[in-house]
Image: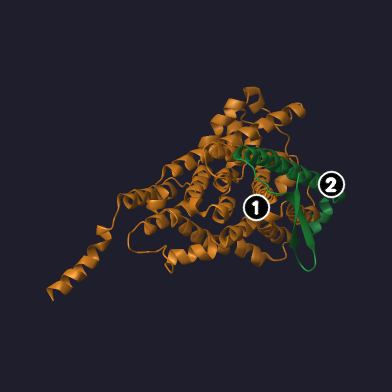
């Protein structure tokens, strides 16, 4: 009887007995993510489930990420199949109004410049000794686009998924802190005060309807490896612009996006097992992710400066910083920064154009990257 | 340069031929520079083409205030 009692009691203590220092550290990391999400309002929709998933997976003996564990089931069903990021993209397409970029198609170029960080960081990661596919996954943090980063990393470097996703979402939420100093560093006060003309509503419904179709077909032909990313975001946008399937548009933008965001977040958190996550490599990835976003901003502003010169001072180079995919946060940062130097300067709609172009740009950059890798026989 | 042809069978009878150099190997430096030039160049080119097509679409289907308001 006493032995049965002792054995039963030891079952209650087993969790404490198996607790390792790495688990404790990761539980603290999970709590920090929860704090950032709940108290600081940094990407709460993702940081809250990621933080909680991180805590869950670091409680010993629960085996939530072992075969048949519930987190493993969600992870296998949605991340390993690449389904969750793609479903999120349908929702993003249904939510995003691409009219600002259609009004001023030249902003597509700013969306391209905002992706330079991906390729420069990839090169930097290679120089630091990461292998080709790991470097690709690290570089894609520079897309400033969570679902794209998750899609590419889950497919080609799943062991880095936790670090890459946390870096992507954390830095996206830190855009208002990261971008302004770079914008100020690279522009003169005269450039920052440039007032851009208000945009007219000049895009016909036919153009708005043809836009997702043209982008899908053209993008798919140039970079077929990225068609799942491009096709899903454009499907969402076609549903939105057609106005014919309001129920589907609303469900994609709300119910589906919400459910998938929850499942995506918790399964990313589940990859943050202390034994795997707490490595020097993770810190290097976080640092490289930061560099990637700084480089994106710098390249965007530099192209903005080039457009300022070629347009004879009609384009404010600050809008170049919005050529990243952090939508619409980056556009708001540009607007705020512009108004610091000229209170009558309303850059929001122009920056929204660059920002929407950045959304497409990040997907195109990932698609091109995957197709180049395929062409070289790496994947 | 030795070339090899990989045949990819698609739907339903389409065959695409991918030609690449035989025993294609490269060091990290070559890979990095290729990704930087072809990847970034490809992104810029693709988005540049897209911007031209959108500008063209806007010319073909101009915004007409009354027709848009009716629809």
The reply to whether discs 1 and 2 touch (Cβ–Cβ < 8 Å) is no
Can you tell which mark lies on residue A230? none
Q: Nearer the viewer, mark 1 or mark 2?
A: 2
From the viewer's perspective, is A104 left or right of A281? right
Residue ID at (73%, 31%): A307
Location of residue A132 (image quadrant): top right
Q: Is residue A117 visible?
A: no
Identify the image quadrant of the N terminus of chain A.
Answer: bottom left
Q: Is residue A307 visible?
A: yes
Residue ID at (62%, 42%): A324
Q: CA distance from mark 1 to mark 2?
A: 22 Å
Q: Position of residue A120 (x, y in %)?
A: 61, 37
Q: Nearer the viewer, residue A182 or A371?
A: A371
Q: Which chain is orange?
A: A
Residue ID at (75%, 60%): B7
Q: Nearer the viewer, residue A213 or A18?
A: A18
Farthest bottom residue?
A1
Q: Say which element carries label 1.
A: loop
Q: Position of residue A350 (x, y in %)?
A: 69, 39
Chain B in the picture: what colour?
Answer: green
Q: Position of residue A329 (x, y in %)?
A: 57, 43
Residue that mark 2 sits on: B56
Q: Is residue A343 above or below residue A34?
A: above
Q: Is residue A88 above or below residue B13?
A: above
Location of residue A344 (image quadrant): top right
Residue ID at (60%, 65%): A251
Q: Nearer the viewer, residue A303 or B11?
A: B11
Can you tell which mark lies on residue A96? 1
Q: Position of residue B3 (x, y in %)?
A: 76, 49
């Amino acid at each position: 009887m006493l032995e049965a009692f002792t054995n039963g009691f030891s079952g209650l203590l087993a969790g404490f007995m198996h607790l390792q220092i790495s688990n404790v550290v990761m539980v603290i990391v999970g709590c920090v993510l929860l704090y950032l999400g709940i108290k600081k309002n940094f990407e709460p929709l993702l940081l809250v489930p990621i933080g909680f998933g991180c805590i869950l997976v670091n409680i010993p003996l629960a085996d939530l990420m072992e075969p048949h564990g519930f987190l493993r089931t969600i992870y296998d069903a949605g991340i390993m199949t690449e389904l969750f990021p793609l479903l999120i993209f349908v929702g993003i397409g249904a939510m995003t109004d691409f009219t600002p970029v259609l009004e001023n198609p030249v902003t597509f170029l700013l969306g391209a410049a905002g992706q330079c960080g991906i390729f420069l960081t990839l090169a930097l990661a290679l120089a630091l000794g990461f292998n080709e596919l790991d470097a690709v996954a690290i570089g894609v943090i520079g897309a400033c686009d969570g679902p794209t980063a998750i899609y590419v990393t889950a497919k080609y470097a799943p062991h880095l998924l936790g670090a890459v996703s946390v870096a992507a979402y954390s830095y996206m939420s830190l855009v208002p802190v990261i971008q302004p100093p770079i914008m100020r560093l690279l522009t003169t006060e005269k450039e920052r005060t440039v007032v851009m003309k208000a945009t007219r509503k000049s895009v016909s419904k036919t153009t708005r309807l043809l836009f997702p179709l043209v982008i899908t077909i053209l993008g798919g032909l140039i970079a077929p490896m990225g068609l799942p990313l491009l096709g899903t975001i454009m499907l969402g946008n076609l549903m939105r612009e057609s106005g014919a399937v309001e129920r589907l548009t609303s469900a994609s933008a709300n119910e589906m996006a919400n459910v998938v965001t929850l499942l995506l977040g918790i399964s990313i958190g589940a990859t943050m097992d202390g034994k795997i996550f707490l490595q020097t490599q993770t810190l290097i990835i976080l640092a490289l992710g930061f560099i990637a976003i700084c480089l994106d901003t710098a390249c965007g502003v530099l192209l903005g400066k080039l457009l300022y010169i070629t347009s004879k001072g009609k384009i404010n180079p600050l809008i170049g910083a919005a050529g990243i995919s952090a939508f619409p946060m980056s556009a708001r940062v540009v607007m705020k920064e512009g108004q610091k130097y000229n209170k009558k300067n309303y850059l929001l709609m122009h920056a929204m154009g660059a920002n929407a172009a950045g959304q497409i740009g990040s997907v195109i950059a990932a698609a091109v990257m995957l197709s180049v890798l395929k062409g070289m026989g790496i994947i | 340069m030795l070339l090899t042809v990989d045949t990819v069978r698609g739907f339903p009878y389409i065959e695409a031929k991918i030609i690449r150099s035989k025993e294609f190997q490269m060091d990290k430096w070559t890979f990095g520079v290729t990704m930087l030039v072809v990847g970034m160049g490809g992104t810029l080119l693709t988005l540049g083409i897209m911007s031209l097509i959108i500008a063209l679409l806007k010319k073909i289907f101009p915004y007409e205030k009354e027709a848009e308001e009716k629809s």
